[in-house]
Amino acid sequence: MKTIDLNCDMGESYGAWKMGADAEVMPLITSANIACGFHAGDPATIRKTVRLAVDRGVAVGAHPSLPDLMGFGRRVMRISPQDMYDLVIYQAGAVEAFARAAGAKLHHVKCHGALYNMAATDEGLSEAMARAVRDLGGNVMLYALSNSLMMNTARNKNIPVAGEVFADRGYSDDGTLAPRDRPGGMIEEPMAAAKQALAMIEEGYVMSLSGKRVAVAADTMCLHGDQPGAVAFAQTLRKAFSERGITVAAP
């Protein structure tokens, strides 16, 4: 029987600005990547989102990013490996503290946006990210792009790592995520997302936007909380998994 973790980027509201439908999506997922305040989120939002996750039995994760509120963490910045280490430790530490206050533990770290994509192909940044996750202690996992340099670096350092795939994103031929503004970069139809998800879980591949079969190892699958209709996407995925006998559980 196949098993998949369904994760979602959450807690991305900020002050009076609201994003996503966290309360509605939370019962449908198994792990939550909670924004840490650098691309979205604030202390009250972190606290509330951690509480939602704990109450629903959802694994609590940190979702650190570049310091880019205006760009939602999606603009590339030049940073050093030391910068990467400090960004991950600082931001994950905030979520870890709220998790501890709620009687839970930090389960995983998944970087956001440009920080995630940069580390997927940069050896120094991947090493620093892996080292930061190790130094957080408590067997905290790293969620890393499937079959990427980031994933292999964590494995080589014996850091618990889950290969992440995306139900609602298009892929390039090299296994990286296609730019969001490229046609097909975002999958906007729930059934199309479910079809891609099942192929990744059951057959171990995803079709790139050019039509190439790209091998993937699907341990955890991301659903974006800022995706319009995120609730419908989550419901469609859960229904497809149930029909195929795929168990949904955090790693």
Image (tube, rainbow, N blue to C red):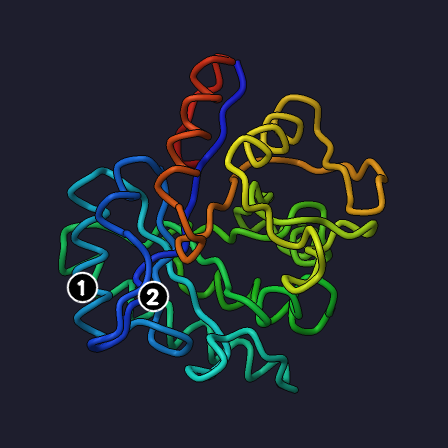
**Image quarter of residue 34:** bottom left
Q: Label 1 crowding class (10 Å Cα cut-off): few <14, some 14-19, many 20+?
A: many
Q: Secondary structure at mark 2?
A: loop
Depicted 230 relative to depicted 246: above or below? below
Residue type of the residue flagged with mark 2 = Glu
Position of the C terminus, as image quadrant, is: top left
Look at 32% across and 35% down and name the residue there: 28
The x and y percentages for residue 73 are 50, 75
Residue shown at 28% from the left, 41% from the top: 58
Front residue of this view, candidates 167 and 137: 167
- Asked if the residue at tag 1 contacts the one at tag 2, i.e. Cβ–Cβ closer than 8 Å, the answer is no
Nearer the observer, 210 or 35: 210
Q: Is residue 239 left or right of residue 196?
A: left
Residue at the (63%, 80%) spot, across then down: 76
Marks 2, 1: nearer the viewer: 2
**Residue 157 appears in the figure:** no
Tell me the element at label 1: helix
Number of residues whose C-alpha sits closer than 10 Å to that of mark 2, classed few (under 14), some (14–19) or many (20 or more): many
Above or below residue 108? Residue 80 is below
* Left or right placement of residue 27 versus residue 237 in this view: left
What is the x, y in percent for residue 79?
Answer: 62, 85
* Kind of residue sitting beneath label 1: Arg
| In-front residue for pair 130/7 | 7
- Name the residue: 42% across, 73% down: 89
Give the label on residue 12, or none: 2
Is 196 situated left or right of 214 in this image?
left
Residue 128 to residue 147: above or below: below
Percent x, y for residue 47?
18, 64
Q: Is residue 213 above or below residue 170?
A: above
The numbered dot on residue 47 is: 1
**Label 2 to label 1: alpha-carbon separation:** 12 Å
Please count the marks in the image. 2
